[in-house]
Image: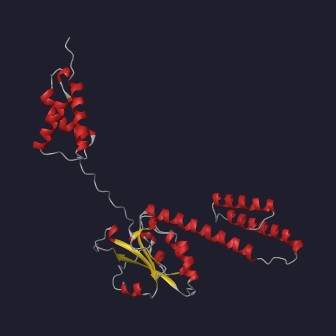
């Protein structure tokens, strides 16, 4: 019975095509070489004994055909669609003015795919980027503190049309600017702000739930800070012999504060357990908070 070597011949030819395409830097993938072989080369060798096929001859035929026929190009990858959070899905009250030292906390509250620009004098100007691309804004706050910004300085948030975009209602056409109230940039953009009042009720149900979780999480952090601050502000006895006992009392009071917050469901179980573990470790070692 006569054997059918068609598949073997096809693969041999396709390998030579693929190899020559790499030499010529055509950018072909294996499937491109297979398609080209099927359309231009295989018909010349189909049914021919494998022993009669010479690699040098095949290469010459491939080159002559390549030089005489249009070269197939690799299919260009589809452009990645940019994902942007719609700034008009942010309740207006979440864009209210804030004290400058609250910058990092407020920005952390926004969606990672929100287009933003943070521009604070000579301290920082990020340009328009996604929120997740922003630098550590806690460091920015510390830079502002070192620069001596007064306590009455406020940061404002405003929605503007992104560079080279139109006011067309598409999420990627806008960004949120965070800058100092009354700064040159605030003045320059005063006529460009896109104003729209948005309430929590205007949000899609999914976003409302996500926002509620964020609000709850932020409150947990605030309550925890307050609890720690209260413990830190308690006056320590000046006598050396009473120091260990004072530190122990301080840690025990902090634990009680945490237990009260957890009992009232003001902080999550995970946050409660993590802080209790840390404080109990310090209590064991007799260390400070």
| 289 w.r.t. 145: above or below | above
User: In this image, 283 relative to 74: left or right?
Assistant: right
The residue nearer to you, when weighing 193 against 244, is 244
The residue nearer to you, when weighing 109 against 235, is 235
User: In this image, 197 relative to 263: left or right?
Assistant: left
Residue shown at 41% from the left, 72% from the top: 116
Of all residues, the one furthest to the top in this rendering is 1
Quarter occupied by the N terminus:
top left
Residue shown at 25% from the left, 51% from the top: 76
Residue 112 visible within the image: yes
Question: Horizontal and vertical percent for residue 138?
Answer: 55, 72
| 41 w.r.t. 107: above or below | above
Quarter of the view holding residue 227? bottom right
Q: How is the image coloured?
A: secondary structure
User: In this image, 26 relative to 281: left or right?
Assistant: left
| 62 w.r.t. 121: above or below | above
Question: Horizontal and vertical percent for residue 155?
Answer: 49, 81
Residue shown at 20% from the left, 20% from the top: 51
Of all residues, the one furthest to the front in this rendering is 56
In this figure, what is the number of numbered marks?
0
Residue 111 visible within the image: no
Quarter occupied by the C terminus:
bottom right
| 176 w.r.t. 39: above or below | below
Question: Horizontal and vertical percent for residue 162?
Answer: 33, 73
Residue shown at 12% from the left, 43% from the top: 67
Quarter of the view holding residue 197? bottom left
Of all residues, the one furthest to the right in this rendering is 241
Question: Horizontal and vertical percent for residue 57?
Answer: 16, 30
Quarter of the view holding residue 90? bottom left
């Amino acid at each position: 019975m006569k054997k059918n070597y068609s598949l073997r011949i096809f693969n041999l030819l396709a390998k030579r095509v693929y190899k020559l395409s790499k030499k010529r830097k055509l950018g072909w993938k294996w499937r491109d070489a297979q398609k080209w072989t099927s359309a231009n080369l295989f018909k010349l060798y189909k049914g021919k004994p494998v022993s009669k096929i010479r690699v040098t001859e095949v290469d010459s035929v491939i080159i002559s055909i390549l030089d005489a026929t249009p070269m197939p190009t690799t299919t260009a990858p589809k452009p990645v669609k940019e994902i942007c959070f719609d700034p008009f899905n942010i309740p207006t009250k979440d864009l209210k003015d804030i004290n400058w030292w609250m910058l990092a906390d407020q920005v952390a509250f926004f969606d990672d795919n929100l287009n933003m620009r943070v521009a604070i004098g000579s301290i920082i100007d990020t340009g328009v980027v996604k929120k997740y691309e922003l630098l550590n804004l806690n460091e920015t706050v510390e830079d502002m503190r070192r620069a001596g910004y007064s306590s009455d300085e406020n940061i404002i948030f405003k929605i503007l049309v992104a560079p080279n975009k139109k006011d067309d209602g598409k999420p990627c056409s806008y960004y949120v600017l965070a800058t100092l109230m009354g700064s040159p940039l605030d003045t320059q953009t005063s006529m460009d702000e896109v104003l729209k009042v948005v309430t929590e009720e205007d949000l899609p149900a999914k976003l409302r739930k996500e926002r509620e979780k964020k609000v709850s999480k932020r409150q947990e952090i605030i309550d925890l800070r307050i609890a720690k601050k209260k413990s830190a502000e308690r006056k320590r006895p000046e006598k050396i012999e009473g120091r260990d006992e004072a530190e122990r009392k301080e840690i025990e009071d902090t634990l009680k504060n945490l237990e009260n917050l957890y009992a009232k469901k003001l902080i999550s179980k995970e946050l409660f357990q993590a802080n209790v573990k840390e404080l109990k470790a310090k209590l064991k070692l007799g260390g400070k908070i």
